[in-house]
Image (cartoon, helix red, strand yellow):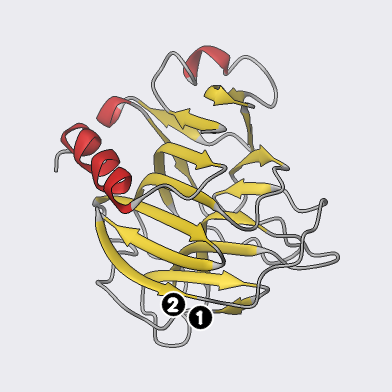
Amino acid sequence: LILCLDATSSFVSSSYGVNPPNWNSIAGINGTLYNNPIWTGSNGGAMQFNGSNQYTNLGYYELYNNFSIAVWFKSTSQIANNTSGFIVSKDFSSGARGFGIGVSRILGFSGRIYLEVNGNPVISPTGTVIDGDNIWHFMALQVQSNVWSIYLDGNFLTSVTPTPPTPNALAPWYSPGRAYVGVFDSFIGQISDLQLYNRPISSSEIVSLYSGSKARFGL
């Protein structure tokens, strides 16, 4: 575990006097909040992002294979048609493209989970529509030997083996949105807990993370 952001008051609200404020990490480097996302104390604490310019810069970890992301999020409003709304990304508008995961309303996704690698969609629409459903969800991305597997609410959703992204040290991790000039593409809603691992966590660990926290989110 190299980064663990939890939006409890002790890790967020106390640091709001800094500009830009930190989202303090339980493990690893802190995230930096930009353009004043709103902290709410509901569900033990969450950050509300407007989908237009608010985000957390998570740093420049060079992870492209054998890593995992785990995040609790709630989509509070639908993104625009023919756009995508990234929840976590490592992408940049100069040099090699990276990847991003979130929801999309392009190519028949209609608000379902969406994964993009090297600037291209790499999964087909699958699962339920969650964009704008105003329900807390737990999503995990497990990358092992270039097999990218997605889990939603503790259940396996799909996997794919794309062309691996080319490392780009200029590409920061954003949550939500992406560091691509003119195409921010952020989801609209709340993020409460975000974890980044420098290893592929197992399916049983994913189930345990979901089961251990779901009561906090009324599930």
Residue located beneath label 1 in the image: 82
Q: Nearer the viewer, residue 173 or 55?
A: 173
Q: Is residue 184 left or right of residue 180?
A: left
When asked about the image quadrant of residue 132, the answer is bottom left
For this orientation, the residue located farthest to the bottom is 107
Mark-to-mark CA distance, 1 and 2: 5 Å
- Number of numbered markers: 2
Q: At 44% from the left edge and 57% from the top edge, which residue is drawn?
A: 141
Q: Position of residue 169 (x, y in %)?
A: 82, 51
Tag 1 near tag 2, CB within 8 Å? yes
Q: Position of residue 193 (x, y in %)?
A: 40, 36
Quick one: label 1 or label 2, which is nearer the N terminus?
Answer: 1
When asked about the image quadrant of residue 97, the answer is bottom right
Q: Is residue 88 above or below residue 181?
A: above
Residue located beneath label 2 in the image: 105
- Quadrant containing the C terminus is top left
Q: Is residue 132 left or right of residue 85?
A: left
**Amino acid type, callout 1:** Asn
Q: Residues within 10 Å of mark 2 (few under 14, many from 20)?
A: many
Q: Nearer the viewer, residue 219 or 74?
A: 219
Q: Nearer the viewer, residue 197 or 54?
A: 197
For this orientation, the residue located farthest to the right is 95
Disc 1 secondary structure class:
loop
Q: Position of residue 29 (x, y in %)?
A: 64, 27
